[in-house]
Amino acid sequence: MDDLGLMARVSSGDQSAIGDLYDRYGRQVFALACRILTDRAAAEDVTQEVFVKAWRNAARFDPERGRVSSWILHIAYTTAVDQVRARHRAAPSRFDDWPDEPDVAADTAGDAETAVMGAQVRSALVHLPAEQRLALEMAYFGAMTHQEIAHSLAIPLGTVKGRLRLGLEALRQYLLIPRRKEADQHVRLSPHR
C-alpha cells in the first residue's frame, strides 16, 4: 500500500494503520530525534509523541503540500526542537545559581557574537520556503548527511542538494542585507570621504 492509501486509513480511524505508519517511518523519526536531542530515552518519547500527533492530525495532512514522509519528519523535527526548548526553559536561571566568581577564560564577546549570529540565522530561516528550511535544519541542526536527508524525505539526492544550495543562498542574501545597509550608512556618514 502506498503512503496516501495508508494516510487515508489513518484518517478514517483504522488503528492498525498507525502501526503500519510507525513501521514505515519509526526508524527515521527516531534517528532524527536522536540527532537533535542526543538522548535515546528522550528520542523514544518524542518518537511516540510524533505518532500520536500523526494519529490525531491525520485529517489535516494535505498531499498537495508534500509527501507523507516530509509531513512525519516535520512533525518529528518540531516536536524534538520543542523538547530542546523546554529543557532550556526548565534550566535554572536565577541569579543565585550563578557562580560566585566569573570564569575569566570565558569569551563573553565571542559568546555574545555567536548568540547574535544565531538569532539572525533563526530569524532568516523563517523566511525560507518550508522545503528549504527543513533540508537546512536536518543538515545543520540535525547533523544528517545529504544521503540521509534524501532517504528520510524520500526525495532524490539532487533535490536535497538543490534545496540546500537555494536555502543557503537565500540565507546569505537575507543576512547580507542589514550589513549592506550598515556599510552604506557608514560610507555616507564618514567625514573622511
Image: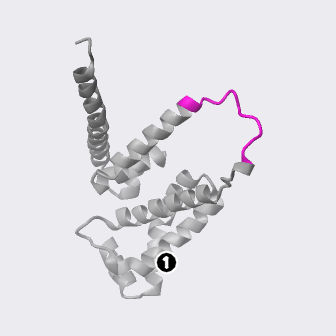
Q: Position of residue 139 (x, y in %)?
A: 42, 45
**From where the camera sits, is residue 144 visible?**
no
Q: Is residue 191 above or below residue 7?
A: above
- Disc 1 marks a residue whose amino acid type is Gly
Label 1 residue SS: helix
| Residue 94 sits above or below residue 173 on the image | below
Which residues make up the magenta segment?
Answer: 97-109
Q: Quadrant of the C terminus?
A: top left
In the figure, is residue 162 to the left or right of 111? Answer: left
**Extreme residue in the right direction:** 100
Is 111 or 76 nearer to us in this picture? 111
Horizontally, residue 105 falls left or right of residue 130, namely: right
- Most common secondary structure along the magenta stretch: loop
132 versus 21 height, above or below: above
> Residue tagged by mark 1?
19
Q: Is residue 96 visible?
A: yes
Q: Residue 59 at what x, y percent from top left?
A: 34, 81
Position in image of residue 119 (x %, y %): 43, 44
